[in-house]
Amino acid sequence: MTRAHEMNDAEIKEKSVSNGKLGVFIETYGCQMNEYDSELVRAILLKESFREVAGLDDADVVLLNTCAVREHAHNRIYGRLQQLSHIKKTRELTVGVLGCMAQNLKMELLDNNLHVDIVAGPDSYRNLPRLIRESRDDKKQTSSIDLSEFETYDDIYPERREGVNAWVAIMRGCDNFCTFCVVPYTRGRERSRPFESVLEETSRLVADGYTQVSLLGQNVNSYEHNGRRFADLIAAVADIPGIRRVRFTSPHPKDFPDDLLQAIKSHPHICKHVHLPLQAGSDRILKMMRRLHNGGQFVDLSSHIRDTIPGVILTTDVILGFPTESREEFMETVKVMETVKFDSAFIFNYSERKGTVARRRWKDDIPPEEKKYRITYLNDVQRNISLEQNRRHIGEIHEILVEGPSKRNPSDWSGRNDGNKLVIFPHTSEKAGDYINVRITAASPNAMKGTRL
Ligand code: SF4
């Protein structure tokens, strides 16, 4: 087993023998960019006089890397902070809030009685060692939330802990200002990481045993460094010896370049999977969201992608119940979903986020029971489409990157095919990180089953 394929609790413990170093426990909420940022934070702290611990019980410092994009994550984090404030009454524990919620709610987090000691936004992680020490030494709250036009952490090699996939951020921030989204305010202006630094990190990942990387950006189509664009970058990453699979997320439908489609089509190591966020099907709602394309253009782009890359897997994100969205407009979203037939979709109800244009301009006026009706309806529609799409693969042979035991039945193992679909198979001698061939024998909306060849 390589370092890529997991560091267990015992190893973390051994690595973290005290030596007078403060024990840090990091909890991550939200998106893959946050997962990646937690790996950066771990690297920054381990370089200084901190050690990682495997659980809260052994921690001197707990850092919550937070998400402000969805209400659900927001509520979970508030619940967690309340639990931690009880623990703080029984022993010394420094509590830090990082990430988008820290950036968005700084004063709220410091002022209320949650007993938060440190608040650090996504561009402030280099300051964390100092913030933690100042907070503990001077028994005071510390914070750093300045956004930077330049910070990409490109000189820091993240400390990854588990899994067969390595996330690699290629850019930070976003300039799109979709009206529902808090990211441009919490992560700042868009900036691309140097081309060479992404290649260097990927080569190091290969040396550490990874064969799959996922390139991350809020809008990868906007990547630009010294005249080189995302299509150049992904092809160069896929060319690195030892790399077998390159994924990416997310492109914006407003500017999907043809050279990227050609790169995906022609490069054997670039996965034939495109995650294309739809958000809504109604032209009026898309305009209110400031998505810069309409429903017809989205459907045309989806057909163009399917025509260019035969067999491509398409997935999406949808927001239901945007302010003033009528039932008829919701049905336009359903229609697009039925037309495009995504392989899977992340479907969410709209919720107001502090600082966004949508919250300033429009009341969250779709009643909860109507939102519930719509999300149930669309989930049912999508479940049937996903089942239909997965059933198409029965009888085919797929190459699977093995991940580990299946969550439902540990005697089965799971892995993912090129299109990122979950495939379950009976375990014999496979190890995480192996590539195996599996014949697909059954399908459900969320996964496929198969037998190893
Ligand atoms: S593209 Fe829109 S939804 Fe995506 S991060 Fe940027 S503002 Fe948010």
Image (tube, grey):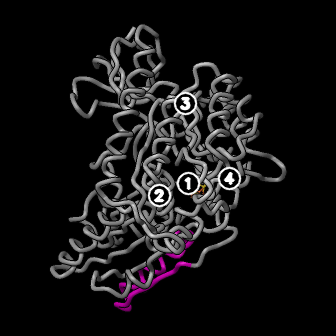
Instruction: Verify CB contact (< 8 Å) between mark 4 and mark 1.
Output: no
Q: Please report the bounds of the magenta region as a residue range.
A: 122-145
Amino acid type at circle 1 is Ile
Q: Earlier in the sequence, mark 2 or mark 3?
A: 2
* Mark 1 lies on residue: 285
Which quadrant holds residue 1? top left
Residue 322's tag is: 2
Identify the element where label 2 is drawn. Answer: loop
Which quadrant holds residue 430? top left
Identify the element where label 1 is drawn. Answer: helix
Identify the element where label 4 is drawn. Answer: loop
Query: How busy is the neighbourhood of tag 1: few (under 14 within 10 Å), some, or many (20 plus)?
Result: many
Amino acid type at circle 2 is Phe
Distance between the alpha carbons at the discs numbered 4 and 2: 16 Å
- Viewer-side residue, 352 vs 220: 352
Amino acid type at circle 4 is Leu
Which residue lies at the image location 40% right of the left edge and 79% below the top edge?
118
Query: Vertical placement of 398 versus 352: above or below?
Result: above
* Mark 3 lies on residue: 340
Task: Find residue 329 and report its horizontal and vertical position in percent.
Answer: 50, 48
* Mark 4 lies on residue: 292
Q: Residue furthest left?
A: 90
154 relative to 159 in the view: left or right: right
Is 141 included in the stretch rendered in magenta?
Answer: yes
Instruction: Verify CB contact (< 8 Å) between mark 4 and mark 2.
Output: no
Task: Tell which tag, 1 or 3, sits nearer the viewer.
Answer: 1
Instruction: Verify CB contact (< 8 Å) between mark 1 and mark 2.
Output: yes
Identify the element where label 3 is drawn. Answer: helix
Q: Earlier in the sequence, mark 1 or mark 3?
A: 1
Q: Earlier in the sequence, mark 4 or mark 1?
A: 1
Which residue lies at the image location 19% right of the left edge and 79% below the top edge?
91
